[in-house]
Image (spheres, rainbow, N blue to C red):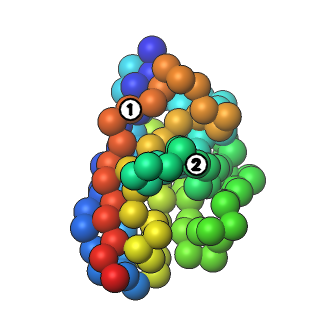
Amino acid sequence: QMQLIESGGDSVQAGESLRLSCVASGRSFGSNTMGWFRQAPGKAREFVAAVSRYSHSKSYSDSVKGRFTIDRNNNAIYLQMNNLKPEDTAVYYCNTQPPEQTYWGQGTQVTVAS
């Protein structure tokens, strides 16, 4: 059973950057396309970015395109977040894309102050 562990969240000022990491324990990501998702207070969880197995294909939500970059290796997935905005405040999760219920972890909190 794959367990996903997110880290790297912090409280920052608008315009600053953060790099989130997600590592898998139990087994590797395998051939899965992997993604980042986020959930802001009072809102539904939403898609942020995804990367295919060999990073041949990447996709982003319109709200983060041009500011966030997703990358992966055999053991980890990363989300480089630049020019952060207050509306990026959320708990960030990694999962397969499309997501599987069993893989949701605790997430990592990102808070962006204006």
Query: Of discs 1 and 2, which sits in the foreground?
Result: 2
Could you classify mark 2 by the number of other residues whose Cα lies within 10 Å: few (under 14), some (14-19), or many (20 or more)? some
Residue located at (59% from left, 41% from top): 34
Considering only vertical position in the picture, is 34 above or below 67? above
**Quarter residue 53 falls in:** top right
The residue beneath circle 2 is 46
Picture coordinates of residue 9, whole percent (x, y): 30, 58
Q: Give the mark count.
A: 2
* The C terminus lies in quadrant: bottom left
Kind of residue sitting beneath label 1: Gly
The answer to the question of whether label 1 and label 2 lie on touching residues, with beta carbons closer than 8 A, is no
Picture coordinates of residue 90, whole percent (x, y): 40, 56
Q: In this image, 23 relative to 94: left or right? A: left
Q: In this image, 112 relative to 63: left or right? A: left
What is the residue that sits farthest to the top in this orientation?
1
Considering only vertical position in the picture, is 2 above or below 31? above
Residue located at (59% from left, 68% from top): 64
What is the residue that sits farthest to the right in this orientation?
57
Q: Is residue 49 visible?
A: yes
Picture coordinates of residue 91, whole percent (x, y): 38, 50
* The N terminus lies in quadrant: top left
Find the distance from the CA under tag 1 to the CA under tag 2: 15 Å
Considering only vertical position in the picture, is 75 above or below 50? above
Picture coordinates of residue 79, whole percent (x, y): 48, 59
**Quarter residue 3 falls in:** top left
The residue beneath circle 1 is 105
Mark 1 / mark 2, whichever is N-terminal: 2
Q: Give SS at disc 1.
A: loop
Kind of residue sitting beneath label 2: Glu
Q: Nearer the viewer, residue 52 or 73?
A: 52
Q: Nearer the viewer, residue 7 or 86?
A: 86
Residue located at (54% from left, 31% from top): 29
